[in-house]
Image (tube, rainbow, N blue to C red):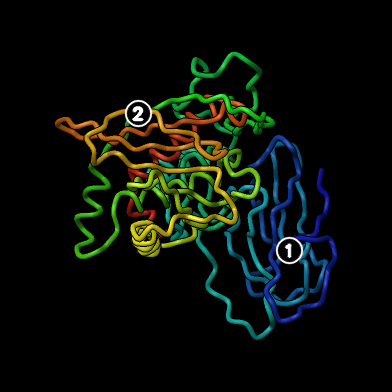
Amino acid sequence: MSRSVSGGASSGRTANSGLPAPIVVPTINANDRIVMLAEWSRPHADEVEPGTVVATVESSKSAAEIEAPAGGRLHWAVPSGARVATGTVIGWIVGLSAAIPPVPRLGEDAGRPCTDSARRLIAELGLDMRGVPGEGLITEAMIRQLAGAPDSGVGTAAETPSDGPSEPAMRGVCPPAKPARAAPVPAFMSRSVAKGPVDAFLDARTGSAVTATDIFLKAQGIALQEFTAWKRGSGGDRIALAITTEAGLIAPAIDDPAARTLDEIARWRIAAMRHVAVGAGAVEARPPTFAFTNLAGQDIEVFVPNLFGGLSATLGLGLRKADQPEWTLCLSFDHNVSDGFYAARFLGSLAELITNPEQLDLA
């Protein structure tokens, strides 16, 4: 069975306005989040009218024709035969005078930053890297959630809390947040991750002000894009950095570290510590809901961070010294907001990011 759908974000078709109009893969079967781009119906760089059928995508049960959302020239961004996720931009309608790059080749690296484990999973699923929606670093957790694949051992069925059903989580989709009650219910878990990759990355950046704290702040920002329960309320994409002073604990917050470079995060951290050192305190118009505290330099292996000031979760960093030193990721979280399975998946995603610090520098 085949049907036609508009390839644009809305159903209205317009004449070309000189701006690129995206051609987006629609959802044609609720059970298939990855479909096949069976064919492009019109040649690359061909001139098309609004409503012209330009492509056909196929799921396991049906097919759909995609229509041009505007008039102009057709730009293929993904080649025929590629497996792509619903919601992916597979092409564009551009102005008649716009330059169009060559036709992409199947299996060609899209140049987007990607962790090694995510790259292996993409290959296993036969997914084209250009068929992953969004921008920035591609992680294994992102691909598993996209494909509905089971998790890779982080948060197994044995670790799933017994206080309620968790079928969506077992399919690789993070469970929705539970409504928060007035009093938090603190819970805790930890896991280890190799320290070597971060050390090697920092050693290669001679003269840089970037530290492990900055790497962890960015990794947490990226991970929180997937695990949204801890971003509820006005805190959004803000992460507090706990700093101990003679006057007590001060926690200035950084806005959207996922969108910043490591050098920008380092400059923010240095400025925040100077600000705190002169006793200026930390006045926050929008209190964060996630915090980070680093005690690795104090020879602390494992500790339970505080859930202060209405936080949903706090990540603590410890250090286990051995022949192969390891970071210990110590996570306190409000069980009213998320369960243990959710927390375990977050730590797994964070560990994957930390072991690929060079990709964080590109994201």
Quarter of the image where one finds residue 22:
bottom right
Which residue is drawn at the image coordinates 23% and 38% (left, top)? 298
Q: Which mark is residue 16?
A: none
10 sits to left or right of 182? right
Q: Which mark is residue 303?
A: 2
Which residue is drawn at the image coordinates 82% and 54% (left, top)? 4
Instruction: Name which residue type carries label 1.
Output: Val
319 sits to left or right of 180? left
Check the image and report above or below for 219 versus 135: above
Q: Label 1 neighbourhood size at 10 Å, few (<14), some (14-19), many (20+)?
A: many
Which residue is drawn at the image coordinates 69% and 80% (left, top)? 95
Residue for badge 1: 54
Which residue is drawn at the image coordinates 58% and 77% (left, top)? 100
Residue 112 screen position, x and y as percent:
46, 58
Check the image and report above or below for 143 versus 203: above
Q: How many marks can you see?
A: 2
Distance between mark 1 and mark 2 Cα atoms: 57 Å
Q: Is residue 361 visible?
A: no
Check the image and report above or below for 326 versus 283: above
Q: Secondary structure beneath disc 1?
A: strand
Residue lying farthest right? Answer: 12
Residue 261 screen position, x and y as percent:
41, 62
